[in-house]
Amino acid sequence: MSALPGNGENEGMEHDVETNGFDGRNDGRNDGRNDDGSAGFGGLVAGADIPQGTVVLAATPIGNTSDASARLIALMEHADIVAAEDTRRLYDLANRLGVHVNGRVVAYHDHNERDKADGLLDNVETGATVLVVSDAGMPTINDPGLAIVRRAIERGLPVTCAPGPSAVLDALALSGLPTDRFCYEGFLPRKHSERMQHLRMLRSERRTIVFYETLHRIADSMDDLLESFGPDRRMALCRELTKDYEQIRRGTIGEIHNSVRNDPPRGEMVLVIEGASDEEVNENTPNVLSIEELAELAAAKAKDEGLRIKEAITRVVAEHPLPNGSLPNRKQVYAAVLAAKGE
């Protein structure tokens, strides 16, 4: 996920972490230890293992700079190559951490990751440490990184992770909803029709569901969540995670829908939705009807409710989605209606 930025309300207000000891020194020491002899943060950085001939995926802070790990800092300083989603953000993070990036920095993003993967891996093959970082959070989770992981596996080259901040897990833990089983669905589709198809497919999902959403689409997405899942399921809307203005809105879909309308949230956010109950699963399991059966239902609905046949077909099709969330073809149903009439 891209960084959860301040969006004007907390620009520059991220928690800054002290830089003392980041270079392995602390009050003149060169072992990174505190005055009492215990290993300080600088000692952790200095002692961090830098694996040679390896691709390392490293999680970066999602808002609070203090969440940077000792391994991330050591890797930023000592990796031979740093493949960054946005090189400007990398250097900005390095400045805030008091870190000097010594290796070669390359842009590695959605538009070039497949083309650059093998070139980076050629360096790994000769013993280089290649660090892969995204703007925020863990690479490959809605961020670049998957291409180089797949190619490294295909080429038999080692890949490891320096774990850290994750908006998905942060929001899930704070939601108060079940965490033993969950599914991560990334960003909801942009278009209304595609979003509704996707949500219809998830109506019978028993696991807790996690989505990402943006400021510009949250109102429309909440409308569609309300239509798809109804007002009573519990959910949490988590925004500005780990920042000074972190906010968790908890309630039912209906309550959160109203809060979004009355008090629009700012920034990128994570939505956590309760999974379906047994009753909802039974109600929402698609009853797959043939085109001919749908045509019969539409003809009956048109007669009983005094509707035009095309309107009746539209309603019947909407009430009988296919297992993948898409809707039956209305033209085929209409043709079946005409065929049944002998026209």
Image: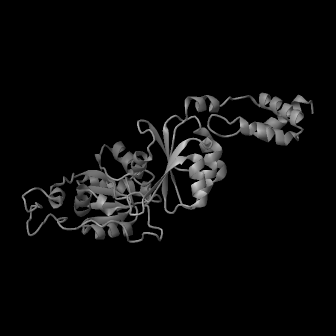
Up the image or down, 61 lies above or below 333; here it is below
Which percent across, then down, holds residue 209? 50, 42
Which percent across, then down, holds residue 40? 15, 59
Say whether residue 190 is visible: no
Which percent across, then down, holds residue 46? 15, 59
Residue, x 78% and y 40% (percent of image)? 315
Side of 294 relative to 179 (left or right): right
Which percent across, then down, holds residue 232? 59, 41
Type of colouring: one colour
Say whether residue 201 is visible: yes
Up the image or down, 10 lies above or below 327; here it is below
Side of 5 relative to 307 (left or right): left
Give the number of callouts: 0
Quadrant for the C terminus in the image: top right
Residue, x 31% and y 43% (percent of image)? 156
Residue, x 86% and y 32% (percent of image)? 299
Which of the 4 image quadrants contains residue 103?
bottom left
- Front-most of residues 13 and 191: 13
Residue, x 52% and y 37% (percent of image)? 275
Quadrant for the N terminus in the image: bottom left
